[in-house]
Amino acid sequence: MASLETSPAAGSAGHWVDRFRSEAAGLPGARLPWLLERRQAAIQRFAEQGFPTRKVEAWRYTDLRDVARLPFAAPPAAAVGIDRLPSVLDDASRGPRLVFVDGAFRAELSSAGSLPEGVTVASLAAALETMPDRLEPHLGRVRPSPDTPLAALNAALWTDGAFVHLARGAALDRPIELLFLGVGGEAPAAHHPRILIVAEAGAEATVIEHHAGLGGVYFSNAAVEIVAEAGARLHHYKLQAEGAEAFHVATTTLAMDRDAAYDGFVLTQGARLSRSELRPWLGAPGIECRLSGAYMVAGRQHADHTSVIDHAAPHCTSRQVYHGVIDDQARAVFQGRINVHQDAQKTDGYQLNRALLLSDQAEIDSKPELEIFADDVRCSHGATVGDLDEEQIFYLRARGIDRAAARSLLIAGFLMQAVEEIRIEAVRDGFAEKVRGWLDARAAGERRNA
């Protein structure tokens, strides 16, 4: 293996470089020259950059020093019963489900079931053994960005994840759920789950990416690569409900072809610190890209939602709608950037971030951006921040509703406006139930403290 050097600014990158040196030979696909080359290039990029600091503009509002200084180890094998597995869907709506515990695929907890012709849902490590030719054109090659060092760390060290492949015209009538469960142990541990989704021309599916935690300190550094070929339609919904002491960073890159449609939603309610970064590339005419989300944070939680949408072709549409509720001493970040390239005439781009601050110490950093190099476009962005309307609370209390319940109803209505962006009914109902659960717990806390 080539020599790896860490730069002076790379901080604790040396710990991870050493991990790669010691583990490289045992990583999935170690005997595949093309994959080994990509892993080596990825760890070299991370060695040069290290963990991003707040001096990097894209990370100005999110501090990773706690992550960088902890000597995360490989997670130990954890025993988890099927009765402890959370789900977004009810039994009637559930389709194929893959379960990963601390990054390791657990076949006994999973249920792929019978899949229609042309659909593959498998462990990424297993797919490398049986169908490496399907992975080689895409794995680690979907619009990689030089300024995403944590995605590079994932590309070097991932041990498993999910592979979803939809052949031309294939379709599923039930959602695929990919559950990544963080268990945590006596010592801080890290895992690097990776997802590769390839939807060939005219294919359609719904994928739920579900991250949940059972406690403990751990670092989940996820990466998702998505290819949507001409006319493909992909519904991709993410629930981030990691443990209260967990760190969660996820980078999703998306390459779309002519007339493809992507409908994405992120619901954030877990983790001590989290960042969900989305990077769609709209590279052909007629693409529709929808990114939406809701975030609910309290205590000392920190939640960062960052997106960079590149309109690189004409006649494409993008829409972003995010609603957030920040309570106690929590902090949220929204950074939404739309890049309209010179040839991307007739672009229609829209983004909106709305936030409720429920305490004097809650904080939101909202930074919508437009960078436009074409002259025939329609682009707009907006951001609003405020508290609940006291007149609306008074109106509800006048009708016999106590203050805690009135506040909860108003917060629910605010968050549900974002949840309504989810187009698949079964998933929308499941996410709405998660919102209600968070609000019920919060209202119960308010009553106890009243």
Image (tube, helix red, strand yellow):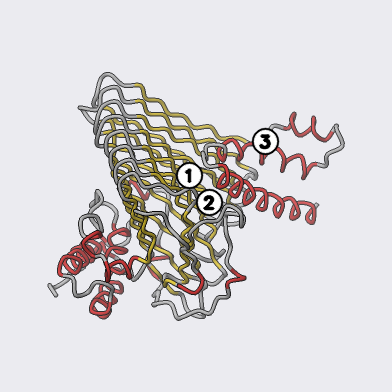
Lower sequence index among marks 3 and 2: 2
Which mark's residue is nearer the viewer, 2 or 1? 1
CA–CA distance between discs 2 and 1? 10 Å
CA–CA distance between discs 3 and 2? 20 Å
- Local secondary structure at mark 3: loop
- Marks 3 and 2: CB-CB under 8 Å? no
13 displayed left or right of 82: left
Which mark's residue is nearer the viewer, 3 or 2? 2
Label 1 CA crowd tier, 10 Å (few <14, some 14–19, many 20+): many
As rendered, which of 202 and 49 lies closer to the eye? 202
**Count of marks, rendered view:** 3
23 displayed left or right of 291: left
* Residue at the disc numbered 2: 268
CA–CA distance between discs 3 and 1? 24 Å
* Residue at the disc numbered 1: 265
The picture places residue 354, in percent across and down from the top left corner, at 54, 35
Which image quadrant for residue 445?
A: bottom right
What residue do we see at 44% from left, 67% from top?
219
429 displayed left or right of 230: right
Label 2 CA crowd tier, 10 Å (few <14, some 14–19, many 20+): many
As rendered, which of 106 and 148 lies closer to the eye? 106
The kind of residue on which mark 2 rests is Thr
The kind of residue on which mark 1 rests is Phe
- Local secondary structure at mark 1: strand
Residue 401 lies, with reference to residue 109, above or below; the image says above
Residue closest to the far left: 2
The quadrant of the rendering that contains the N terminus is bottom left
* Residue at the disc numbered 3: 388
Q: Which mark is residue 287?
A: none
Label 3 CA crowd tier, 10 Å (few <14, some 14–19, many 20+): some
